[in-house]
Image (cartoon, rainbow, N blue to C red):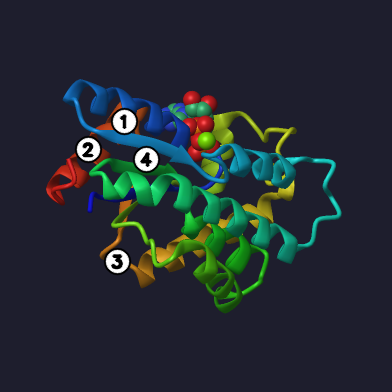
Amino acid sequence: MSKFITFEGCEGSGKSTQVALFKEYLEKKGAKYIFLREPGGTDISEKIRNVILDVSNSEMTDETEALLYASARAQLISQKILPSLKNGTLVFCDRYIDSSFAYQSYARGLGLEFVKKINSYAIENCMPDYTVFLNISPTEAFKRKGGVDKDDRLELSGADFHEKVYSGYLALAKENPDRFIMIDCSGSKWQTHEKIVKELEKRGVL
Ligand SMILES: Nc1ncnc2c1ncn2[C@@H]1O[C@H](COP(=O)(O)OP(=O)(O)O)[C@@H](O)[C@H]1O
Ligand SMILES: [Mg+2]
């Protein structure tokens, strides 16, 4: 089995930026890899993503939201993640189950048990080997980003919500110290990139 690495962090923490730099790095190295994103990564999961993020879906209940994330994830796992891992491809995913814990369990208040339970049907024990956590507070991240994206229902959820997401992530990191790789990303995007590469090299992933 190959390795499965996820990137996590608050909105604007730099996940997409780092994923782009990382792709260039892996390309130069000639590594066999695949990059996926959540929710999304398959045609069906991308359609579910549009439903989740659509700002006109203001009536969506927290439970519906959590189940939609789990459905998108179930499809991604069977169609992309497991087959790739089986054929020796390094799998990277921009967000994964920890986003559900941080957003649905902690910030929406659904609790860990509910989210674990619905995800247990979706993930078939497919947990990441390592989770790269881009550690920056939502206040700092939104400042850097220049405000919220008004086309994204989650980004519009308010400062309190995003603070809860952040503290949820910190709690998860504390509970999973061997899996979480904490990256201080207050520096430039290149400094952050170098830190991530160094940490993954140290663990024999690259
Ligand atoms: N280290 C950094 N320093 C300054 N700005 C950054 C840094 N990393 C990312 N950014 C900027 O912050 C914004 C959000 O980054 P992005 O990668 O889209 O975050 P995410 O995918 O986590 O929401 C972008 O405008 C990006 O250019
Ligand atoms: Mg992004």
Query: Mark 4 Cα within 10 Å, few/some/many (few <14, many 20+)?
Result: many
Query: Mark 3 Cα within 10 Å, few/some/many (few <14, many 20+)?
Result: few
Task: Give the Cα separation between the discs numbered 4 and 1.
Answer: 15 Å
Q: Which residue is mark 3?
A: 177
Q: Which residue is mark 1?
A: 22
Query: Mark 1 Cα within 10 Å, few/some/many (few <14, many 20+)?
Result: some
Regarding mark 1 in the picture, which secondary structure is present there?
helix
Task: Give the Cα separation between the discs numbered 2 and 3.
Answer: 18 Å
Q: Amino acid at mark 3?
A: Pro
177 left or right of 98 in image: left
Regarding mark 3 in the picture, which secondary structure is present there?
loop
Pointers 4 and 1 in contact (C-beta within 8 Å): no
Q: Mark 1 or 2 closer to N-term?
A: 1
Task: Give the Cα separation between the discs numbered 4 and 3.
Answer: 18 Å
Q: Mark 2 or 3 closer to N-term?
A: 3
Q: Amino acid at mark 2?
A: Val
Pointers 4 and 3 in contact (C-beta within 8 Å): no
- Judging depth in this view, the residue of 90 and 110 nearest the camera is 90
Q: Mark 2 or 4 closer to N-term?
A: 4
Q: Determine if the C-beta at disc 4 is less than 8 A from ligand 1.
A: yes
The residue at 66%/72% (across/down) is: 110
Regarding mark 4 in the picture, which secondary structure is present there?
loop
The disc label shown at residue 197, or none: 2
Q: Which residue is mark 4?
A: 185
Pointers 3 and 1 in contact (C-beta within 8 Å): no
72 left or right of 172 in image: right
Q: Mark 4 or 1 closer to N-term?
A: 1
Q: Nearer the viewer, mark 4 or mark 1?
A: 1
